[in-house]
Amino acid sequence: MSKPLFNIATVERDVGLSKDVLRVWERRYGFPSPERDAHGERLYPFEQVERLRLLKRLMDQGHRPGRLMALPEAELAALVKVRPNATEESTQGNTGALDAVISLIKNHDATGFDQALQQRLAKEGLQRFVQDTMAPLTSMIGQAWEDGSIEVYEEHLFTELSNRLLRKAISGVPGGQAPRVMLTTLPDEPHGLGLLMVESALSLEGAHCIPLGTQMPLMSIVDAARAHRADVVALSFSAAFPARQIPPLLQQLHGLLPEGVVLWAGGAGVGRLAQQSGVRLMVSLAEVQTAAVEWQAAAKSVTSTQTQPPSA
């Protein structure tokens, strides 16, 4: 019996990795290594599709593809079992450690909090630190704010110390080139910590980030995108932002942006929104990284096409 083979459209649909990402991995890592049909179209064996599914699950947990590619199947499967997902980890084994970090804020120990975060950053590296420490910590602080177990000034202290640490960590990442991503929030959205986490993820993928801070008026965003020759405008929405206001604002901004500028929107505030025409919605940092890789692959494909000599 001949082994089953799957075309690239089927793999994209079933695995959740875009065609661009599959092609980039093929060139960069030598995997997947599809066969070709009589017309030169890619065909993927079942075993490779199964491995791609494992890789996608682990990427969603915060792992980077470059590290995963060298691991044998058994180790990939073990990683999935050890870390079912980032949320589950943060609410189980990681909760006690993060509660201890938050208690430093509640005890007004700014020095201790700063040292604890720096230790976790040194141990985890920037990507895991953002994924496994900052993201769940921010969620826990938000919950504490809602249930009244944390004071206004304590929440502000957490935010300011976290912002300072992340900015310093990002400054140590070599500058990227593309895409040129402008990061901001709309008026009435003062929460900027999410922007810094996104900037961390994008910087690690080689993007050139242009941080504009929070609460930018729509027309100022449009003007800045033109002035900075942005490829992407990325907005962050916290859970506190009124969800019903987001779709019309996104559509208005999309219609105003210069031609060719892509609009991304992320954060807890967009988690329950339906897909928006002309806007890419993303909730997890893994989705942000995937979006950057796909943009880079698409840009490279266009450049390659433009530089090919005309056929005789």
Image (cartoon, helix red, strand yellow):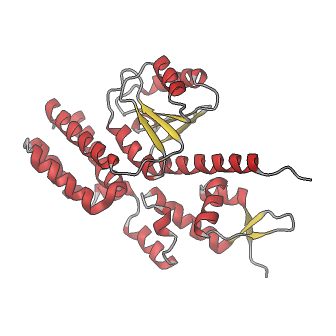
**Residue 301 at x, y = what percent?**
69, 50
Instruction: Name the residue furthest bottom.
Output: 1
Q: Residue at position x 37%, y 55% from top?
A: 127
Q: Quadrant of residue 124?
A: bottom left
Q: Residue at position x 53%, y 21% from top?
A: 248
**Residue 132 at x, y = what percent?**
32, 55
In the image, is 230 to the left or to the right of 153?
right
Q: Quadrant of residue 241?
A: top left
Question: In the picture shown, does residue 245 fall above or below 194?
Answer: above
Question: In the picture shown, does residue 203 fall above or below 228?
Answer: below
**Residue 184 at x, y = what percent?**
41, 30
In the image, is 86 to the left or to the right of 106?
right
Res. 230 visible in picture: yes
**Residue 14 at x, y = what percent?**
64, 58
Q: Residue at position x 43%, y 47% from top?
A: 175
Toward the viewer: 30 or 78? 30
Q: Quadrant of residue 39?
A: bottom right
Question: In the picture shown, does residue 246 fall above or below 287?
Answer: above
